Image (spheres, rainbow, N blue to C red):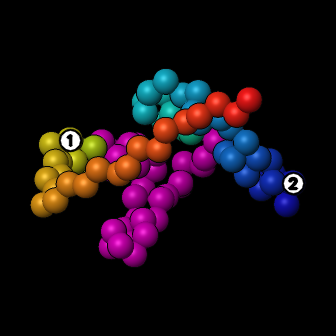
Amino acid sequence: MGERADLIQRLYGFDWATVRSRRDGFDQLRPLVTDDFDSQLSPELGERVIPGVQGLEVFVEAVEQDFSEFRYEADESRRSATIGCSSWG
C-alpha cells in the first residue's frame, strides 16, 4: 500500500501548472508510470483504452488538431449590465 500511496502523491502532488509544454508534461509523467500504463477514456469518448504514455500523447495531439479550427458562431449575443463601483468613505 505504501508504494501506491507514494505514486498517488507524486501524481496528484505534482504542480502540473508549472509544466511549460505538453511534451514536458508527458516527459514528467513517463517515469511515474509502468511500461503497461493504459488510459481509459470516458464513456462519452467510447471508453477507448489508449496504451502507454506515447499513445496518450498522440491522442491529445490529435484532439488538439481536430479542434484547432473549431469556431462557435452564436445565433444571438447579449450584453450584461455593467454595475459601477463606488467608494465607501
In the rendered image, residue 5 lying in the magenta stretch gets the answer no
Q: Which mark is residue 2?
A: 2
Across the whole image, how many numbered discs are drawn on residues?
A: 2
Q: Quadrant of the C terminus?
A: top right
- Which residue shows up at 77% across the image and 56% down it? 4
- Number of the front mark, 2 or 1: 1
Identified by mark 2, the residue type is Gly
Q: Which mark is residue 68?
A: 1
Q: Quadrant of the N terminus?
A: bottom right
26 displayed left or right of 31: left
Q: Nearer the viewer, residue 88 or 3?
A: 88
Helix, strand or loop for disc 2: helix
Q: Is residue 79 above or below residue 24?
A: below
In the rendered image, residue 41 lying in the magenta stretch gets the answer yes
Residue 9 % position (x, y): 76, 47
* Residue at the limit of the structure toward the front, as seen here: 89
Name which of mark 2 and mark 1 comes first in the sequence. Answer: 2
Residue 2 % position (x, y): 87, 54
83 displayed left or right of 44: right
Q: Is residue 47 above or below residue 17?
A: below
Identified by mark 1, the residue type is Ser
- Which residue shows up at 39% across the image and 75% down it? 43
Span shown in magenta = 32-61
- Which residue shows up at 60% across the image and 49% down it? 34
5 displayed left or right of 35: right
Mark 1 is surrounded, within 10 Å at the Cα level, by few (under 14), some (14 to 19) or many (20 or more) other residues, namely few
